[in-house]
Image (cartoon, rainbow, N blue to C red):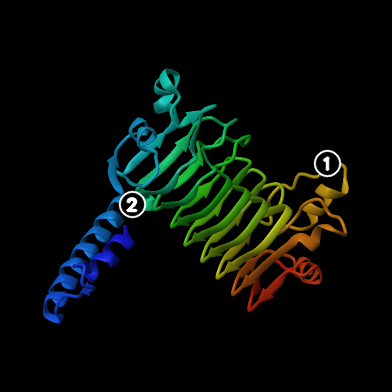
Amino acid sequence: MLLFFFKAIIKVQDSGKGIVVPSCQEGGRAMLKIVALLVTLLIACSSTAFATQEITVSGMVELLNSIGSDRIIHLAPGSYKLDDALGFASRNAKNIYERRMYILGVKNLKISGEALSKTELLSPYSESDVLLIKDCSNIELENFSIGHVQRTKGCEGDALRIEMSKAVKLNNMAIYGCGENGLTLKNVEQLEVKDSYIHHCTYNLLKMSEVGNSRFIATRFVHDGSLSVMATSDKIKDLAFDHCQFIIDPTREVFVPQGEILEYAAKYSLVAKHYSENWWEDEELSFTNCEFTNVNPLEVAQLRTKGMLFKDCHLKGQQT
């Protein structure tokens, strides 16, 4: 198409006596018309390619029905409860499976609440994740909370699980227990979590494997679970925490069955996992301008020896 327009900019005619080129004035007017037409068509094509549908929903079934690519979903204030969609799921199982909500194979989707304090995605199903995002790109969640109904014995599912996805943003979100883990990441690239609050989960706040080029910015972690703030495995590349707060409840009951793995988790509250000589070679974590409350300075010192970076960080509270 572009070739056609460029050919048309200079009108060339073969009269049998050679090539005839229009006058400068005529050529100038023709060029202006062609350029104007070309710009109009480019704008029209661009608008079609990046068209975004905006939808406002006020209930769980509406939310599930609205999931898809190239759209913005506005959540009216309120509680979006997975059990409200139980009958809906039995009819066509769209965007809800095994009593968890999922976003699968979607790109260019934003889900936005009006305010964090006014909007929540809530599950009563302790054995299932609340929300799964898988095989997606360019997903953004903002201004709402994700969690389970609180149960004294904790939950088996996670609050938010993200798998095989890239370019995911969480902004001004609250992710909480009583799920096993708050945020579970597997094979995730370009995650950004900003101005958010992750707290009070049964085991870990973060569970991560194969995560790269990702950032947590100005995010607060409050941990009273039985393992560590974060558990990492496989390759963690270029994972940075900037201006984050980590607060450990010193009265938490640490789970310590037999075996050095969980003994390590009991001893260290910030990072724990299978401990081997080769594990640390695949871990690239950095902390800049972060604040740690009730984290043992010996743990930070050991993490430094394993290659983790701490710059302009501060320790507060219990340090024994």
Residue 158 falls in image quadrant: top right
Q: Is residue 136 above or below residue 171?
A: above
Percent position of residue 169, x then y? 48, 56
Q: How many marks?
A: 2
Query: What is the distance, in whole Å, between disc 2 and disc 1 at their CAs?
Result: 56 Å
Percent position of residue 302, x then y? 81, 68
Q: Nearer the viewer, residue 123 or 136?
A: 136
* Residue at the image point whose x is 33% and y is 41% from the top: 78
Quarter of the image with the C terminus is bottom right
Q: Residues within 10 Å of mark 1 (few under 14, many from 20)?
A: few
Classify mark 2: helix, strand or loop: helix
Q: Nearer the viewer, residue 39 or 130?
A: 39
- In front of the other: label 2 or label 1? 2
Q: Is residue 182 left or right of residue 262?
A: left
Q: Which residue is mark 2?
A: 49
Q: Is residue 237 above or below residue 157?
A: below
Residue 303 falls in image quadrant: bottom right
Q: Is residue 158 above or below residue 309?
A: above
Q: Amino acid at mark 1?
A: Pro
Classify mark 1: helix, strand or loop: loop
| The label number, if any, that marks residue 257 in the structure image | 1
| The label number, if any, that marks residue 149 in the structure image | none
Percent position of residue 218, x then y? 51, 66
Q: Is residue 213 left or right of residue 25?
A: right
Q: Residues within 10 Å of mark 2 (few under 14, many from 20)?
A: few
Residue 61 in sight in this render: yes
* Residue at the image point whose x is 17% and y is 72% from the top: 32
Q: Amino acid at mark 2?
A: Ala
Q: Is residue 77 above or below residue 304?
A: above
Residue 317 in sight in this render: no
* Residue at the image point whose x is 72% and y is 49% from the top: 227
